[in-house]
Amino acid sequence: NAGVTQTPKFRILKIGQSMTLQCAQDMNHNYMYWYRQDPGMGLKLIYYSVGAGITDKGEVPNGYNVSRSTTEDFPLRLELAAPSQTSVYFCASSLTAPPYEQYFGPGTRLTVT
Amino acid sequence: GQQLNQSPQSMFIQEGEDVSMNCTSSSIFNTWLWYKQDPGEGPVLLIALYKAGELTSNGRLTAQFGITRKDSFLNISASIPSDVGIYFCAGPDSGGTSYGKLTFGQGTILTVHP
């Protein structure tokens, strides 16, 4: 199993551009999550999904959108990128809750200039 | 909302030393998770705790679920250079259906000098 995979690993965007961060998991997990991690900070939840077709906002959803058409994939869309979105983005998944163990991807480092 | 406070914020130790860190909250948690994040990587789950008073080991790592349910502790024995990284505690959001959402502490940064 590859676990949770994310692409791309690095990306530089200009202000106002858009992009999609890809996330896929092959563990048949129902729940998936998107986090951002700013330097020296913990993880903040952007959006989450409890199954295909079901998504909801987390703590910091502004400027982002998500969709979940399959169990495996959970892409994160950035529209009109802003410097405040410069961060490292992590996707995670869990089977159910409980148990609450989430498994993380390797991250996407995004810079908006 | 819930908050998890980790201490210390950072530690600088010599290889071979033991390490202790903790995580505290003003509210009760029913689960405690400890993650490690290597530089440039995603967090990796180290230990999960589900019962108050529980003590669980994973190699040189030992974690404990505090009996008050408001704290948890992580110990690393005989540290080695590859222990370097950020250690996060986490617990599930409370109140209603949390859908597995976790609250994370701000992390403890560990540096090990050879």
Image (cartoon, coloured by chain):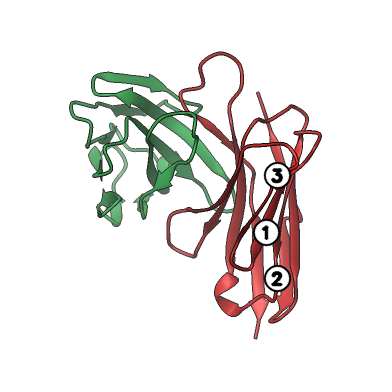
Instruction: Report the front residue among B108 and B78.
Output: B78
Image point 39% across, 34% down: which residue? A33
Same chain under badges 3 and 2? The reply is yes
Q: Which residue is mark 1?
A: B62
Q: Which residue is mark 2?
A: B77
**Which is in the foreground here, disc 3 or disc 2?**
3
Mark 1 neighbour density, 10 Å: few (under 14) some (14–19) many (20 or more)? some
Q: Which residue type carries mark 1?
A: Thr
Q: Which residue type carries mark 2?
A: Ser
Residue A67 relative to residue A36: left or right: left
Q: Which residue is mark 3?
A: B54
Mark 3 neighbour density, 10 Å: few (under 14) some (14–19) many (20 or more)? some
Image point 58% across, 26% down: which residue? B93
Q: CA distance from mark 2 to mark 1?
A: 8 Å
The green one among the chains is: A
Instruction: Report the front residue among B42 and A2.
Output: A2
Residue lying at the far right of the rendered structure = B68
Q: Is residue B82 visible?
A: yes
Image point 51% across, 47% down: which residue? A38
Chain under disc 1: B
> Does the residue at mark 2 contact the one at mark 1 (Cβ under 8 Å)?
yes
Same chain under badges 2 and 1? The reply is yes
The red one among the chains is: B
Please say if B4 is above or below A55. Answer: below
Q: Earlier in the sequence, mark 3 or mark 2?
A: 3
